Image (cartoon, rainbow, N blue to C red):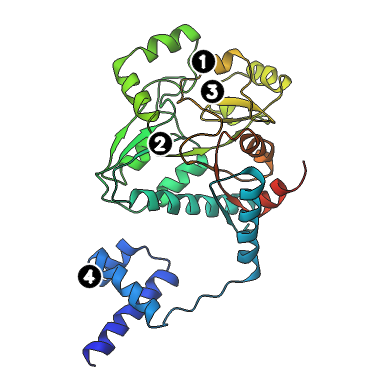
Amino acid sequence: MNSMDRKLDDAARAAWLSYIAGKKQDEIAQIMGISRQSAQRLLSQAHAAGLIKVRIDHPIARCMGLAQDLQATFGLEACEVVPSLTTPSESGVAVAVATGDMIESWLMRDTPMVIGLGTGRTLRGAIEHLPHIDCAQHRIVSLTGNIAPDGSTAHYNVLFTITDKVSASTFPMPMPVISASTDERETLLGQKTVQTARDLAARTDVRFVGVGPMTDPSPLLMDGFISAEDQSRLVEKGAVGEVIGWVFDENGTLIDDRINDRVSSAVMEPSPPRPTIASAHGPDKLAAIRGALRGRLVNGLITDEETAIALTQAP
């Protein structure tokens, strides 16, 4: 076998590992005993040599069209729609993987950035999907408190999960998502370590957040941050969802309630000046997602096909 044939053979092997076996570039490099850069070059060679054939079927094409429709309807800067699978749970895995891929693309940038992370089940799945990445040039900050009501680590907080995946410095927010009282919130916010994280959160270059519904029981209730009485009162006031703990109505307007007075998370502002990308899907979250989009609390969305179709239709 001459050197050209050997190069094509290696390129085909790398392409097979990537597109058939579903391996990431660092895994391909490890399997083939080469550097990540060499794996990237082999995949480029495979493309250039015509070894990789891409076919776009109807479901994917429809997803692309739905993403464009959502961008036009809600004025989004970024939108990705993945095909829906058999169950909402399986679709959730697909949304998490797509979210992980987008987070990875930001982590792979050479320019130093501050990346903000919210919390939730989908985001945690996205972080678990990440490979190990050397990205010491970046800083990653939590947008929410990292402490559960009982003083333990908040279960679906993702900052401590990503710490095991990346070499970037990470900055937790050492306080509850929702403080026990407004006085407690003000006391905690005065602490230097908390203020450092909040100052960094105010300077994020991109944010990734989840969207929680206020259906019974809501994630805030299940995780112990609010009581059943709190939830009933919020729903009576028109609450449909929450993003990093901030509770809002169908138009994305924050609810006037003592719960929002006790939220310790980073400030949520309409029409954020930075990419603020929500990762969410499912019929139970539909009203919450639509409210966040209407109020322009987020300007990016990663979701699945069925949710996207519902969002493009009149409620």
Instruction: Quickly name the residue at label 1.
Output: 262
Q: Amino acid at mark 2?
A: Gly
Alpha carbon distance from label 1 to label 3: 14 Å
Element assignment for label 4: loop
Q: Depth-wise, is mark 4 or mark 2 nearer the camera?
A: 2
Q: Earlier in the sequence, mark 1 or mark 3?
A: 3
Kindly identify which numbered label has been placed on residue 116: 2
Horizontal relation, residue 173 to residue 34: left or right = right
91 up-or-down from 11: above or below = above
Who's the residue at 24% across and 44% down the image?
A: 136
Kindly identify which numbered label has been placed on residue 111: none
Q: Earlier in the sequence, mark 4 or mark 1?
A: 4
Q: Residue 240 placed where, x, y %?
A: 67, 30
Q: Amino acid at mark 4?
A: Gly
Q: Earlier in the sequence, mark 2 or mark 3?
A: 2
Instruction: Quickly name the residue at label 4.
Output: 33
Q: Assess disc 3: are there few (<14), some (14-19) or many (≥20) residues with their C-alpha within 10 Å of its C-alpha.
A: some
Quadrant of the rendered image containing residue 224 = top right
Q: Residue 139 placed where, x, y %?
A: 30, 38
Q: Amino acid at mark 1?
A: Arg
Q: Does the CB distance between marks 2 and 1 fall below 8 Å?
A: no
Q: Depth-wise, is mark 1 or mark 3 nearer the camera?
A: 1
Instruction: Quickly name the residue at label 3.
Output: 224
Q: Assess disc 2: are there few (<14), some (14-19) or many (≥20) residues with their C-alpha within 10 Å of its C-alpha.
A: many
Q: Amino acid at mark 3?
A: Gly
